Image (cartoon, helix red, strand yellow):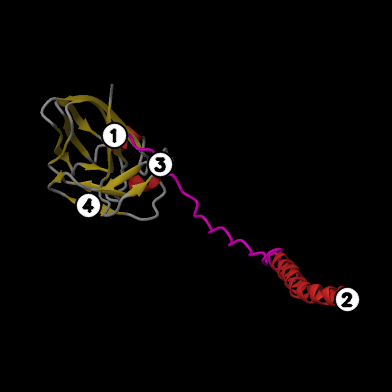
Amino acid sequence: MKQPLARFFSQLLLAPALALLVAGCSTTTTSTTSNATTPPAVAAAPAPATTPVVAAPPTTPGVIRIKAGSEAPYTDSKGNVWAAEKGFNGGDSIERADLTITNTADPAIYRSEHYSMDSFSTPVANGKYLVKLHFAECYDGITGPGQRVFSFNVQGQVFKDFDVWAKAGGPFTAYVESVPVEVTDGKLTITFTPSIENPQINGIEILPQP
């Protein structure tokens, strides 16, 4: 009778330990299953749209372009920007829209002018320049050569009895007079002297030279 009673007590003591072991295995399994769960995929946000960058036309330091008679800047066929008129002393200006001008890729330059002026001047750095003076005879009161004659002086270089019609070979025709000069006093000056009718000009370019 002693041996069966001892086995009974032994089994009674082992039962709680087995119960704890089973519970521990169950907890471990549940925890492993939970950790193995894969979170749902998150869609990537679309990349923001980009605005294309348009490069501005290159500019050369020291270059001055003026569209005489114009109230607004003008960009020519090569991408060069011409400032609205400035620098004139005396006279008046006029714009004539839709004129057909020959001998140029930029007829708009010659559709405005300053006339009857005494002079033009602008501050520049001392140095050598090529000055380009743009002319076209577009006044309907001029019908032939010799009806508009004037003289001008570009930084000491004198052009006497200048006739736009004769130089260009007719009306509504572009003509460019190029004058190399040197500035030593920080200012480029052009003076105009009338002879017959009034002086006139359509555009001025001042280009630094090496």
Q: CA distance from mark 2 to mark 4?
A: 132 Å
Discs 1/4, front: 1
Q: Are marks 3 and 2 in contact (CB under 8 Å)?
A: no
**Does the residue at mark 1 contact the one at mark 3 (Cβ under 8 Å)?**
no
* In the foreground, 63 or 11: 11
Task: Report the residue at 20% width, 31% height from top.
Answer: 161
Tell me the CA gap for discs 2 and 1.
115 Å
Which range of residues does the magenta coloring cover? 34-61
Judge the density around disc 2: few (<14), some (14-19), many (≥20) Cα neighbours within 10 Å. Answer: few
- Return the disc, 3 or 2, that comes first in the chain's sequence: 2
Q: Is residue 201 above or below residue 26?
A: above
**Residue found 34% across the figure and 37% down from its top:** 59
Q: Is residue 57 magenta?
A: yes
Q: Nearer the viewer, residue 111 or 82?
A: 82
| Tag nearer the camera, 3 or 4 | 3
Residue 201 in view (yes/no): yes
Q: Position of residue 75 (x, y in %)?
A: 37, 46
Question: Which residue was labeled with disc 1?
Answer: 61
Query: Which comes sooner in the sequence, label 2 or label 1?
Result: 2
The rendered magenta stretch, by its main secondary structure, is classed as loop
Q: Which mark's residue is nearer the viewer, 2 or 1?
A: 2
Q: Residue furthest front?
A: 1
At a point 25% along the width and 50% down the height, the residue shown is 69
The residue tagged 4 is 93
Query: Which residue is denoted by mark 3 in the rendering?
Result: 57
Expressed as whole percent of the image width and height from the top left, the position of residue 190 reads 16, 35
In terms of sequence position, does the residue under pointer 3 or pointer 4 come before the other?
A: 3
Residue extending farthest top: 210
